[in-house]
Structure formats: structure tokens, C-alpha cells
């Protein structure tokens, strides 16, 4: 488990205040520690649940956001190894990296195409028909997959989305809006799954700018062809009236059909 929710203040009485500790825990304390969180240093905590389960938690600030990482069970990860992991994670975070993202990457982050398939599976039961499902995936295959389909969902950037949407943003306005919404849904799923920290769709609006849907007008006839077109229409109307007057009138049931 990668993240753990904070406990109520009365369960954090073992958390020290003041100067941060360094290698504060001992092997003997690991076996007798009461429920709560017990700081060791470098953001590393021994987390003892009321049931007696003991695991390692590390608290870090990653790119301005507080994160908590699970480093494993005390039964599987000894104190010395937990300290090594905590120190490596802290160095990575101080350099601007994301230890949680690195862990997810090691576990295998899905491509954008795989993520889209998972999102569709989750949404399928909420749709009335299969048509919406086909259209949803078809639009991503046509516009998004050639650019980002094989890319890890964690690596998709706002620049990638602009490359997808800019060519169609004004030329095919309604299609572009649908594609953008579907991109947003897939990337929001990736945020929820903690494969990434943000949704790049949130940053592309000002660059794309407002849309003005293009209205397609019928081709105008040249002036010299207007009279002939009117005569053709009139002749067709006369032919229709003549066929109705010369034919047999249908019965009420036939007319209804």
C-alpha cells in the first residue's frame, strides 16, 4: 500500500516535536512499540496499528505536496534496509523527483492506450448502448493513439495534448471538444491511481483559445443557372400533382400506412 491516511491527533502522541530525530529507533523497540507512529529520521516512521501489525511509512514533500509512502512490513524489511530506502527517497525528492512515481514505474505503469481500455471497462455498464463505447474508443484511436497510445500514461504532457488537439480545434470543433473530454477522463483516472500527480488537460485551455464552430453553407448557384433550376423544381412539382390526381385514391387505412 503506497499511501496511508493520517490518524486522529490523539493517536500521534508518539510523534516527537522540535528537532528531527536521526536513527532514533532500535531493534528492541520495534518489537515492543505501542500503537501509533514512531519517528526514526529522514521522514521514516514505524507504524503500529491497534491490531499489532507493524510497517514502515515515510513522509516526504514531493514537488510541494506532502506524500506518504509505504516501505513494507517490518517482518520483511529490517530497520537498516528501511533507513536505506528512506534516505534514497529523500534524496530523490530533494532533487525534484517523485519516489512514488518511481515505484509505480518499477511496478509497470500502463500505456495511455491500456489506461483508456481500463477506463472504458469501468464506464461500460453505465452506458445504455454499445454505440457510445465504439465512438469513445474510435475517436481516441483516430486522434490520440498515434501520438500517445504507446506512451506511459505518466509521461503524457500538455505539449502532447496540444499536438493532438491543435490541428482539429477550430476545423472540427465539436469532435475536438469530445476528444479533449475523453483525454481528460483517462488522465484523471491516472491521477486517481497515482500514476501521475496532475492532469495536463487543465493547462491547455488558454493555449487552444475559444472555439467558433464553422457553419457549412450550401453552394450558391451561378446567376445564369437560377432560372433553369426554378423551372426544374416547378416541373417536378407539376409531375407530382399530376400523378396524385390520375391515380386511385387510397383508403383511410392505406393512407395511414
Image (cartoon, rainbow, N blue to C red):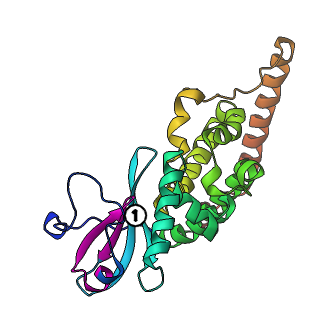
Dot 1: element: strand
Is 35 part of what is drawn in magenta? yes
Q: Sort mark 1 into few (<14), some (14-19) or many (20+) by Cα contacts within 10 Å.
A: many
Instruction: Give coordinates of residue 48: x percent, y percent.
Output: 28, 79
Q: Quadrant of residue 105?
A: bottom right
Instruction: Give coordinates of residue 226: x percent, y percent.
Output: 81, 18
- Residue 199 located left or right of residue 251: left
Is 193 part of what is drawn in magenta? no
Asked whether residue 189 is in view, the answer is: no
**In front here: 80 or 145?**
80
**In front here: 182 or 6?**
6
Quarter of the image with the C terminus in it = bottom right
From this view, report whether residue 37 is shown above or below residue 61.
below
Quickly name the residue at label 1.
Answer: 58
Magenta stretch in the rendered image: 29-47
Quarter of the image with the N terminus in it = bottom left
Q: Residue at x 31, y 67 (%)?
A: 24
Q: Residue at x 39, y 73 (%)?
A: 56
Q: Quadrant of residue 44?
A: bottom left
Q: Residue furthest top?
A: 223
Instruction: Give coordinates of residue 73: x percent, y percent.
Output: 42, 81
From this view, report whether residue 36 is shown above or below residue 238.
below
Q: Residue at x 78, y 50 (%)?
A: 146
Amino acid at each position: 500500500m503506497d499511501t496511508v491516511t493520517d490518524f486522529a491527533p490523539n493517536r500521534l502522541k508518539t510523534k516527537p516535536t522540535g528537532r528531527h530525530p536521526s536513527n532514533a529507533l532500535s531493534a528492541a523497540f520495534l518489537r515492543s512499540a505501542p500503537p501509533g507512529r514512531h519517528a526514526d529520521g529522514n521522514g521514516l516512521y514505524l507504524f503500529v496499528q491497534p491490531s499489532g501489525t507493524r510497517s514502515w511509512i515515510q513522509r516526504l514533500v514531493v514537488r510541494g505536496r506532502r506524500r506518504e509512502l509505504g516501505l513494507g512490513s517490518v517482518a520483511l524489511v529490517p530497520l537498516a534496509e528501511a533507513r536505506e530506502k528512506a534516505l534514497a527517497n529523500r534524496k530523490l525528492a530533494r532533487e525534484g523527483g517523485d519516489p512514488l512515481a518511481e515505484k509505480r514505474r518499477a511496478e509497470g505503469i500502463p500505456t495511455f492506450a491500456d489506461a483508456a481500455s481500463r477506463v472504458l471497462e469501468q464506464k461500460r455498464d453505465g452506458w445504455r448502448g454499445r454505440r457510445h463505447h465504439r465512438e469513445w474508443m474510435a475517436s481516441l484511436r483516430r486522434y490520440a493513439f498515434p501520438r500517445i497510445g504507446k506512451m506511459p500514461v505518466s509521461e503524457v504532457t500538455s505539449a502532447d495534448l496540444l499536438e493532438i488537439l491543435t490541428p482539429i480545434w477550430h476545423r472540427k470543433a465539436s469532435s475536438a471538444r469530445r476528444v479533449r473530454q475523453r483525454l481528460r477522463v483517462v488522465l484523471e483516472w491516472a491521477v486517481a491511481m497515482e500514476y501521475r500527480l496532475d492532469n495536463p488537460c487543465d493547462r491547455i485551455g488558454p493555449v487552444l483559445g475559444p472555439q467558433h464552430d464553422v457553419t457549412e453553407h450550401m453552394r450558391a448557384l451561378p446567376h445564369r443557372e437560377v432560372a433553369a433550376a426554378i423551372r426544374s423544381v416547378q416541373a417536378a412539382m407539376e409531375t407530382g400533382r399530376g400523378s396524385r390526381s390520375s391515380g386511385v385514391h387510397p383508403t383511410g387505412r392505406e393512407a395511414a400506412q
